[in-house]
Amino acid sequence: AVARSPSSAIALITELGARGAFTTMTLSLTVLTDVIVVVLFAVTMLLVHAIVGDGGGQPGWVVLASFAAQIAVSVLIGVVLGYAMDWTVRMTAALHAKFRLHGGGSMASTGDRRSISERVACPAAVVLSIQVAIVLAESMLMQLTGFGIFESEQWEEKTWGGTFH
């Protein structure tokens, strides 16, 4: 079961402090398996919707174009969120390095007489604000997606009278 669950694999690796080629390969294969399962599920849902959904079916190119669009949007969102997370991690690491270089609570070499809490407050607020903005954007995206699904189902009901589910 551990080999099929990324969260279990990560928990075990973290708890045991495992490192090395085997650990990296196991985690990579576990995540890759999950990605393949999600992609196959998306393809299956598109095919079922194309065959059964509208009663008449859709041409193959429409199904493939819809699948390609879904994958492209997912990759775009993943890249944007990945860069945002990378930037956040780099900012956090830079803050940690800066305070290690200045010897913790001592004065900086530039003559900055502020305490660590004063020097950390502004950058930490920026990082926290960015993290909150990412969470809010994800929440808004999920709500808009749900609203879009709800509206499309209402439109189907009005147009064709009844549901297809």
Image: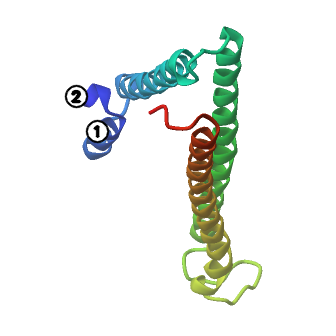
Callout 2 touching callout 1 (CB < 8 Å): yes
Query: Which label belongs to residue 1?
Result: 2
The residue under the point 30% across, 42% down is 17
* Dot 1 amino acid type: Ser
* Above-or-below relation of 96 to 69: below
* Above-or-below relation of 55 to 147: above
Out of 12 and 149, give the one closest to the viewer: 149
**Could you tell which of marks 2 and 1 lies nearer the N-terminus?**
2
The residue under the point 54% across, 24% down is 53
Residue 124: x and y, percent? 61, 73
Residue 147 lies left or right of residue 26; in this view the side is right
Crowd class of label 1 (few under 14; some 14 to 19; many from 20; radius 10 Å) = some
Between the residue at mark 2 and the residue at mark 1, the CA separation in whole angstroms equals: 8 Å
* Dot 2 amino acid type: Ala
The residue that mark 1 highlights is 8
Label 2: element kind:
loop
Residue 123: x and y, percent? 67, 73
Residue 26 lies left or right of residue 163; in this view the side is left
The residue under the point 39% across, 29% down is 27
Find residue 106 and report its image quarter. Answer: bottom right
